[in-house]
Amino acid sequence: QEQVVESGGGPVKPGGSLRLSCSVSGFRFRDYYISWFRQAPGKGLEWISYISSGGNTIAYAESVRGRFAISRDNAQNSVHLQMSSLRVEDTAVYYCARYRGSFYEYYGIDVWGQGTTVTVSS
Amino acid sequence: DIVLTQSPLSLPVTPGEPAAISCRSSQSLLYSNGLNFLDWYVKKPGQSPQLLIYLASYRASGVPDRFSGSGSGTDFTLKISRVEAEDVGVYYCMEALHTPPITLGQGTRLEIK
């Protein structure tokens, strides 16, 4: 079964750090881009970061650039999101998801995790 | 940055009736290979987001055929031919050119009358 599973969420104080992980199974991990999305309470879905299949292309949303860092370990079939300088407004459910990054082989973001909750509060 | 504008933002529908959601892009999503890079997703309460339609009109695996997508360039539509109670949720269009930032529409909340 193709799946991605997030972990690492929890409560943290403003200014603190947290490391989220996305573990994948059931498919050839090195063929896929991984994106992180989040949904804050009462808000819409927001894309925050992606990493290419080889790890050489990375992008961030303006709202997290300079504070979050994405990385991947193809040997361990995992992606990590290191979150620093956390703010109250980073409180959200964080989802990782996979997709093919090619314009000639794209089938949508077709596998999503169940999400992990990050709560930033003093 | 690409801006996606959805309408309506709220969509009350009687079961068995059709529904349509519009998504307008500030830039063309038609790539040089002739494909339109626009996806549709639904976020149901308590569930992860789910892919419905990719490349504007291709139904994802397992998605009922009452869902269809159409459009090209900057104007796209998601249609549900006969709404069912299980379709309640928030529907998002998302540009799939993946030129950062990846943008989504504001979301359309479908509710049952």
Image (spheres, rainbow, N blue to C red):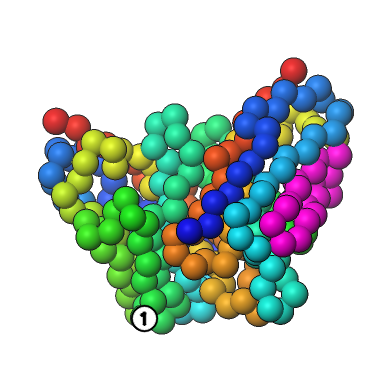
Of the pair B25 and B91, the residue shown nearer to us: B25
Q: Chain of mark 1?
A: A
Q: Is residue B98 left or right of residue A79?
A: right
Residue at image point 48% right, 58% down: B1
Q: Quadrant of the C terminus of chain B?
A: top right
Q: Which residue is mark 1?
A: A56
Of the pair B25 and B103, the residue shown nearer to us: B25
Residue B22: quadrant of the picture: top right
Number of other residues with Cα within 10 Å of mark 1, as a class: few under 14, some 14 to 19, many 20 or more: few
Of the pair A53 and B8, the residue shown nearer to us: B8
Total marks in image: 1
Q: Is residue A55 left or right of residue A102?
A: left
Circle 1: residue type: Asn
Label 1: which secondary element? loop
Residue B79 within the magenta-colored segment of the rendering: yes
Residue stretch in magenta: B62-81
Position of A106 relative to B69 (above/below): below
Position of A30 relative to A98 (above/below): below
Whether residue A49 can be seen here: yes
In the picture as drawn, the residue positioned furthest to the front comes out as: B26
